[in-house]
Image (tube, rainbow, N blue to C red):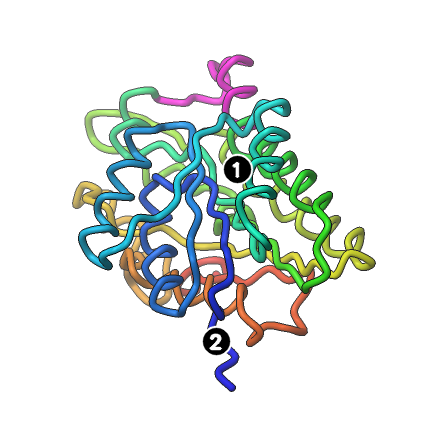
Amino acid sequence: MDDFNLNKNNILITGGGGFLAKSFIEKIILSNGLPILIDFDINKLKVTQKYFEKKFQFKLPIYLADLSKESQVCKLFMKLNKDYESLDVLINNAAPNPTFDEVKKSNFDFYNFSLKAWKRDIDAGLTSAFLCSKYYSMLENKKQRVVINISSDLGIIAPNQSIYKSKNSISYKPISYSVMKHGIIGLTKYCSTFWIDKRIRCNAVAFGGVENKQPKHFINKVKKLIPMGRLAKKDEYGSTIVYLASNASSYMNGSVVVVDGGRTVW
């Protein structure tokens, strides 16, 4: 028996149209799972759907919802429950994560960070994970299920703000991102014990940064903070997701798997 075989399990991925989701989706498909994509951006969903339709010759199911709105999350899970015999895995991946250019443009200085921006980011990345976890766990299911929450190395350590600065500008990683990703780990630990009677395992992953066309001065600074001396490649995280979604991790619950090239060790 192959413990890493996902056995045609239905796997919900929030933020399914995002950059990181693509690496999850591909490894899930190759491991015999069915990704079901959820996002608030229909254009991103369709682009992702079209990409994998061309690559694997089948159309991935997509669902549109604003996951920070409880009414929409409730309706979404009611529909999903009707559409599928079982919903085996939930990956809470939805989260705002500004690109380097967005950080540079918006500054995100702590003292000028607005309450509106705070609420927007916390709702998108943490409230959405809470709501999806809540309604997913309320579904009746006799099978063992899995929830995987996507945190970050910045859910374990503080951002090193010096890497966002250049000769011509001063920028900051927003406070909301750090708090959101720390909160995801807290949510994971809480749910892992609360769901014992429901046979739902809940774990988190803390991923490091991924190469994504960042400027050279940023790359040169951040790689000095990582023992392996580089950022992750975009296809290096999907296998960890498959591991946590599969029977290979059957005795893992409440864990935080850190995959960051060693950055949080220093």
For the stretch drawn in magenta, what is the main secondary structure?
Answer: helix
Q: Amino acid at mark 1?
A: Ser
Q: In the displayed structure, does residue 222 sit left or right of residue 258?
A: left
Image quarter of residue 129: top right
Specify the label residue 83 is tagged with.
none
- Identify the residue at image location x=59%, y=42%: 82
Residue 197 at x, y = what percent? 82, 58
- Identify the residue at image location x=25%, y=51%: 52
The single residue placed furthest to the bottom in the displayed view is 1
Is 140 or 217 nearer to us in this picture?
A: 140
Crowding at mark 2 (Cα within 10 Å: few <14, some 14-19, many 20+) = some
Q: In the displayed structure, does residue 49 sit left or right of residue 89?
A: left
Is 163 or 70 nearer to us in this picture?
A: 70
Residue range of the region highlighted in magenta in the rendering: 107-122
Residue 48 at x, y = what percent? 28, 43
Crowding at mark 1 (Cα within 10 Å: few <14, some 14-19, many 20+) = some
Is 113 magenta? The answer is yes
Image quarter of residue 29: bottom left
Residue 73 at x, y = what percent? 59, 30
In 3D space, how far apart are the residues under numbered discs 1 and 2 (Cα atoms)?
32 Å
Residue 55 visible to the viewer: yes
Q: Which residue does the numbered mark 1 point to in the structure image?
A: 178
Is 175 or 137 nearer to us in this picture?
A: 137
Q: Amino acid at mark 2?
A: Phe
Above or below 37: residue 200 = below
Residue 240 at x, y = what percent? 45, 65
Q: Secondary structure at mark 2?
A: loop
- Identify the residue at image location x=44%, y=48%: 36
Specify the label residue 4 is tagged with.
2
